[in-house]
Image (spheres, rainbow, N blue to C red):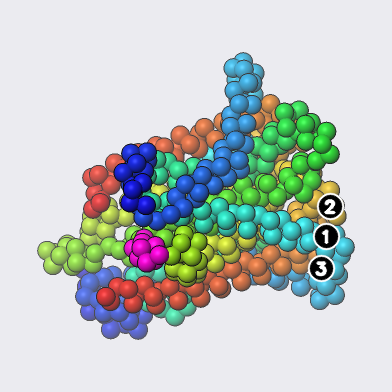
Amino acid sequence: MTEATSTSKINKPRQTIGEGPRTRLALIAVALVFLALMLIAPLVVVFFEAFSRGLGVYIDALAMPDTMSALQLTLLVAAIAVPANLVFGVAASWAIAKFEFKGKSFLLTLIDLPFAVSPVVSGLVFVLLFGANSVLGPWLADMGIQVLFAVPGIVIATIFITFPFVARELIPLMQQQGSSEEEAAVSLGAGGWRTFFLVTLPNVKWGLLYGVLLCNARAMGEFGAVSVVSGHIRGQTNTLPLHIEILYNDNKAAAAFAVASLLAMLALLTLAVKTLLEARFAGSLAAQRRH
Amino acid sequence: MTAAAPDRARRTSWRRRSVLPGFNLALGYTLAYLSLIVLIPLAALAIRSASLGWTEFWAIATDPRIVASLQLSFGAAILAAIVNTVFGVIVAWVLVRYRFPGRRWLDAAVDLPFALPTAVAGIALATLYAPNGPFGAFLEGVFGVKVGFTSLGVVVALIFVGLPFVVRTVQPVLEEIDRETEEVSATLGAGRLRTVTRVIMPGLLPAILTGFALSFARGVGEYGSVIFIANNLPFQSEIAPLLIVIKLEEHNYAGATAIASIMLVISFAMLFVINLLQAWSRKWFGHD
């Protein structure tokens, strides 16, 4: 049909076959409009609404004591959940990527389980486990430990939700790199930890960083699971996303969006670092392909 | 080390021998942590729903309000996954095949729903699609369609959260596809449309189905972005996860557990069917 030997500006790489220039433009336009309406517009609205009542309202919303305590709790939860899942991700990817054993794909499926479970169901699971009419709940309460409607419950639910992130990033990367470098290091006399820190870690550090960033973004932004286990006690068990919900339902939309803009900026930062890392990765991958 | 080698090989015949250390520690820690955080808690849910008893479970499962919420959650998730599949494939195609100014920005933007907290997305979408919001007023004025605070709003929210799954599963496969088969097809006289539908699409089908399944599974369980844009009326725009939250607030643990287990069983069953479809299409069209 329209086998254009492309002279159009849109098409830089050399192509002998492909769609005609009109089809190209139409497809690009469809993609651009769809992403602009579905993804970019909601992001723009967050910042627009946050500043809609002026800078004063914005700063007041952030300086509210409830916002401050929600921010502190969110940072605390992420500071526990992310390192916990980081250690797990490293251990799991070492076992899965560097060794061959039976049941590996089943183990991978189990690691992905939290992605398949609704956030609300994840929260429910911990309510059933630690609630008043469970086995563990009263026993822990006797020892003076409250899990549900308190910080420990929020931390555990967040760990569950963000469980696969680091492992998911690291496993394919480490599988792709193989284990010959580590085997060389070990046969030259390096110990296990030394091999890991001096050989493996430098090879996977950017993938590891990206996994940690994704894990962190989700840990700070988790809503459904945390909402179920938190009990919504203001100033005590409110994380930033729960605080946003309360402000929004109190008809304080500008304040809700002001707090939301903090999390939106975290999301933008995460995406920016990801894009930078990928540009770096693309360079090293291209170098590998040339050999 | 060499003296212990044959002994070790016999002991651990379920895995291939390796000179690398740390397998037992790494796997042991992985299994312990996995059990503690994921497996035991999920088992608690399974045990609790098994202890309900069949008659009680059936009474909850056939409650009209619960049936309506499940229908909405699964129906809206399927609709959103279809929309995401169509547009996700177009976006992936444009990102892989064409070069144009701003392509990198577009590529980065696709991940936004992964990074943006669902509550933030929820209030933003609710503001956009509310009757007095920019999109809501336009859609109602021009097409007479109400989106905000209706079941259609649920679909819009699920499109938002599910979009990256289709793009990110199709994109790498599209990058790997061998251009030469397309050239052969064109040389042999096939038109572009025929080449795309008969040569490229079959190879992409497993990735497309996977993207559809992931987008669907995410949509069924989604809560945060939906509850703000829907007005959450029973029988109209009340999703199943919200009904779980309501049952929990009423201290109706049996009801909450029953809804959760129905949701889990249906989503696992659908994912299983889609896995079979994928295996089938790989067998008939795939190269691996």
Is the Cβ of the residue at disc 2 closer than 8 Å to that at disc 1? yes
Q: Where is residue A136 in the image (x, y as percent from the top left)?
A: 73, 32
Among numbered discs 3 and 1, the one appearing first in the sequence: 3
Q: Residue at x 32, y 55 (%)?
A: B204
Among numbered discs 3 and 2, the one appearing first in the sequence: 3
Residue underneath mark 2: A236
Nearest to the eye among marks 3 and 2: give it: 2
Amino acid type, label 2: Gln
Amino acid type, label 3: Leu
Spatial distance from mark 2 to mark 1, Cα to Cα? 7 Å
In this picture, residue A167 sits left or right of residue A46: left
Q: Is residue A262 above or below residue A116?
A: below
Residue underneath mark 1: A69
Give the prevailing secondary structure in the magenta stretch: helix
Q: Where is residue A25 in the image (x, y as percent from the top left)?
A: 38, 73
The N terminus of chain A lies in quadrant: bottom left
Secondary structure of residue under mark 1: helix
- For residue A188: magenta? yes
Among numbered discs 2 and 1, the one appearing first in the sequence: 1
Q: Residue at x 64, y 24 (%)?
A: B60
Q: Position of residue A155 (x, y in %)?
A: 70, 50
Residue at the extreme top of the image, as rendered: B55
Q: Residue at x 68, y 46 (%)?
A: A156
Residue B208 visible in rendering: no
Q: Which chain carries label 1?
A: A
